[in-house]
Image: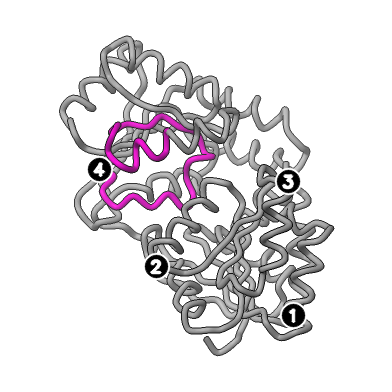
Amino acid sequence: MKGDDVLTVVGTGGGKSLTYLLPAVISEKTTFVIAPTKSLIDDIIDSCGRLKISSCKFTGDIPKEVQESQLLNLPKFKVVVVTPEMLEEGELINALYQLIEKEKLERIVFDEAHTIVSWGNTFRPVYKQVCEKLANIIVPKLLLSATVTGKLEAELKTIFSALTVLRTSVFRENLFLEVKERTNKFYDEVKDFILEHKNESGIIYCVLPKDVATVHAELLKRGVESVKYHGQLSEDVRVSNHTKWFNDECHVIVANSSFGMGIDKKDVRYIIHARMPTSLEEYYQQCGRAGRDKLPSKCILFYSYGDKNALVKLFQREADPRKTQCNVVTEVL
């Protein structure tokens, strides 16, 4: 509210979105929110709808005529949510500068700010480049995350030079973590667990889209109804499956990391990791989907020693900066 540039590190479910939605309600100006995934953007738009905050979104799959209409009416929206790529060039970034010139921009919010570094240094360089450009704009900036290590904080400060850092505990006392070796009875174990927690919401996380498809199919063979979510599915299918799960029409969703940040269903009772996630930050983020109503919830990670080799191969196929993460995985395991 004072207009400082702030990095806020708050545990999952800690109410980070209120730090910019509340000022947006009070202010007559527009707040720009940069979010890294479509699922997170949709969740922010849904939150705005529930709070009666006028909002719109700009993503690559929004029809051109809809984008043009929103651009014409941009000052009328309290919250504008965008992917970083939409601000790389073109009409939207020009519209943002016009809001600044007319003193109609309240602040720029960078949601899940840790991904500026972790993704911007690897497979999504445009993300970091856009943030470096926006860092020099003289309007209040707010960076939000639940998983910013000291190293990530230092790198964010090289981009945003005048950051005030606010941290709270990220410990979630209502989450109970369990690690189990994955055996050839894995699918039966998962089926039994789900049946023991019938009518409770849960998420099963996989690393790759093909793993999502496999787990979904194996559960179906065993009579367990579930829906699936990953980036290779069409927008209509993703939205439909998310809605079914969110509204308790189906209690189990099988997904990869594209279904993580910003998923705000309060009564998720369990998280199951079918394999080791790609990082500790990802593991924390995904576990953080559980127990947002503060009630006891379980997080079960199934691992095998083959997971190490699979992750190392995955990192080696990607850009050179991932070698650092590859080395970390090798050292830890």
Name the residue carrying label 1: 100
Mark 1 and mark 2 in contact (Cβ < 8 Å)? no
Quickly name the residue at label 4. Answer: 269
User: Residue type at mark 3?
Assistant: Arg
Mark 1: secondary structure: helix
State the SS at label 3.
loop
Q: Name the residue nearer the viewer: 44 or 77.
A: 77
As drawn, the label of residue 124 is 3
Q: Position of residue 214 (x, y in %)?
A: 46, 16
Q: Tell me the crowding category of disc 2: few under 14, some 14 to 19, or many 20 or more residues within 10 angstroms, Cα based.
A: few
Measured from the top left, where is residue 316 in percent x and y? 71, 29
Question: Which label belongs to residue 51?
Answer: 2
Q: Label 1 vs label 4: CA separation?
A: 44 Å
* Separation of marks 2 and 1 at Cα, in angstroms: 25 Å
Q: How many marks?
A: 4
Task: Say if 315 sits above or below 221 in the image.
Answer: below
The kind of residue on which mark 1 rests is Ile
For the point 50% across and 73% down, the residue is 20
**How far from the left and from the top, in percent, is residue 283?**
45, 43
User: Secondary structure beneath disc 4?
Assistant: strand
Q: Is residue 71 magenta?
A: no
Q: In the image, what residue type sits under mark 4?
A: Arg
Q: Is residue 220 left or right of residue 236?
A: left
Name the residue type under label 2: Leu
Separation of disc 2 and disc 4 at Cα?
A: 25 Å
| Element type at mark 2 | loop
Write down the region rendered in magenta: 241-268
Q: Magenta residues: mostly which secondary structure? A: loop
Q: What's the residue at 28%, 23% (across, down)? A: 190
Which of disc 3 and disc 2 is earlier in sequence? Answer: 2
Q: Are marks 2 and 4 in contact (CB under 8 Å)?
A: no
